[in-house]
Image (cartoon, helix red, strand yellow):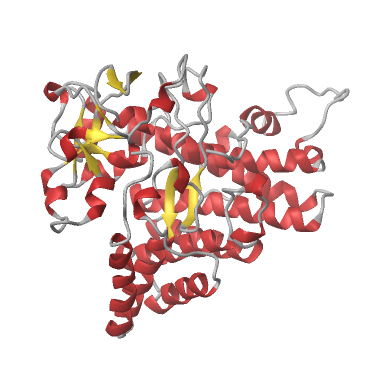
Amino acid sequence: MRHYIKYLFFGSLLFLANSCREALDLTPVAARTADGFLNDPKNAVEAVNACYYQLLRLQEFNENNHTHDYFFGDLTTFDSQIGSTPNDFSDLQRLTEWTMNNTNVPARTLWSVGYQGVHNANYVITSLPDATIDANLKSRLMGEAYFCRGYWYLRFATLFGNVPIVTTRLSTTDFKDAKKGTIHDAFEQAVADFKKAAELLPEKSAYSAADIGRASKGAARGFLARTLMYQIGFDKQNTHTWQEVLDETTKIINSSQYSLAANYATIFETEGENNNESIFELQATSLGNAERATDAIGSHSPTCQGVRTNNLLAGVIVWGWGYNNPTQDLVNEFEAGDPRLSSTVFGKPHNNGIVYGASFNYDIGTEWTPYHNRKAAKTPGDASGGFGWWRNGNNIRQMRYAEILLMHAEALYNTNSEGPARTYLNMIRKQSEKQHFCPRV
């Protein structure tokens, strides 16, 4: 990608900020306190970057952590099979069978990464108000921190249900004693955080090129609408209404900040990153000498979903582990001639296995289905020297304008406006008619 946020790991500072000071009753010499640290605008920005860094860690792999968004999405549905070899990653098998426990690696990773993200956001939210930096910058950074915290509580609500609600800086000991809240509490915290973020954040167009990818007012409203919609469906204590969802999606539509991509086929390609349809996406970049997640700020997801074993694509070795094989059930959901299918799957049964103008060396013995995820397909450029195959520069799309229109249609339908709902639904269908393959294919 051309533009990305430079994420900086901030964990060491946060650990020091919460360490016990009574154990060593010494006067600091030439040291900056955590709060004073934020008086430097650059440091304040880096503190917020640490919040984004935790979001990207949901696409990581190393010896202790392994989790991806699709582990909890695609693989738990009839749209996808695990893939890879039969005995690979038994914890993932248990996750898809709904038999996991508290030692399950994907679930445990999401929990620990998520609460570190909450901790980072809480540091900013509780410390930044006293910082002596530009008021406009402070407001924006606060909004970004609220957005990131809301993101996590929405994930916690939908995946774990009853979780501790932590909104202040806690020591490790205090966190262990935190009381478990309800799914209602988690949803309400996410709603409150997204509302505050929407109040403080600028519109997408207000960001300079150097800040592309940061949360915007539209992103906060979009995630607020998503939260309200989920809460209406899952929270027995819910008091929110479909009118609230409609209000938020209407604000986004009327902002004139977004539109559907002219060519659906480009959305998940490099040229489609941060396009006019993008509401929010996790920014990634490929570092050719990075061997592990802690050494890079790219996504491991394309490698994880790539065709199994060492494969040649345009004469270049492209590695893959073969996870997340789309099913025939998913393929059958597409109407005959729907061009979006070619942007959804690839494999021997479809387009003769051709992707980016070349064919993989498909290993049928390691495929649970004959299909792979086209949105995560790797290009020869992803296989540049060293460990470039390990971490890719593919941005992870988290919300698109198409989802806003679909939520808007659903809210209209649930507020007795079926006619207008059909109009917005058909806007999505018409977009598919404009698809054509990218010029480089």
Q: Quadrant of residue 66?
A: top left
Tell me the residue at 31%/52% (across/down). Answer: 436
Number of numbered labels in the structure image? 0
Q: Using residue 208 as the reference point, say whether residue 107 is left or right of it.
A: left
| Image spot of residue 437 (x, y percent) | 32, 47
Tell me the residue at 48%/55% (across/down). Answer: 278
Instruction: Point out the image quarter for the C terminus.
Output: top left
Q: Nearer the viewer, residue 154 or 256?
A: 256
Q: Using residue 142 as the reference point, say whether residue 267 is left or right of it.
A: left
- Residue 212 sits above or below residue 407 on the image: above
Q: Using residue 300 as the reference point, say whether residue 355 is left or right of it.
A: left
| Image spot of residue 23 (x, y percent) | 73, 23
Would residue 38 be seen by someone viewing this image from the given angle?
Answer: no
| Image spot of residue 102 (x, y percent) | 32, 33
| Image spot of residue 296 (x, y percent) | 53, 25
Q: Nearer the viewer, residue 305 or 240?
A: 305
Q: Which residue ends up furthest to the top in the rendered image?
A: 386
Tell me the residue at 26%/53% (across/down). Answer: 340
Tell me the residue at 50%/28% (across/down). Answer: 286
Would residue 287 be seen by someone viewing this image from the given angle?
Answer: yes
Q: Using residue 249 as the reference point, say whether residue 416 is left or right of it.
A: left
Q: Quadrant of residue 34?
A: top right
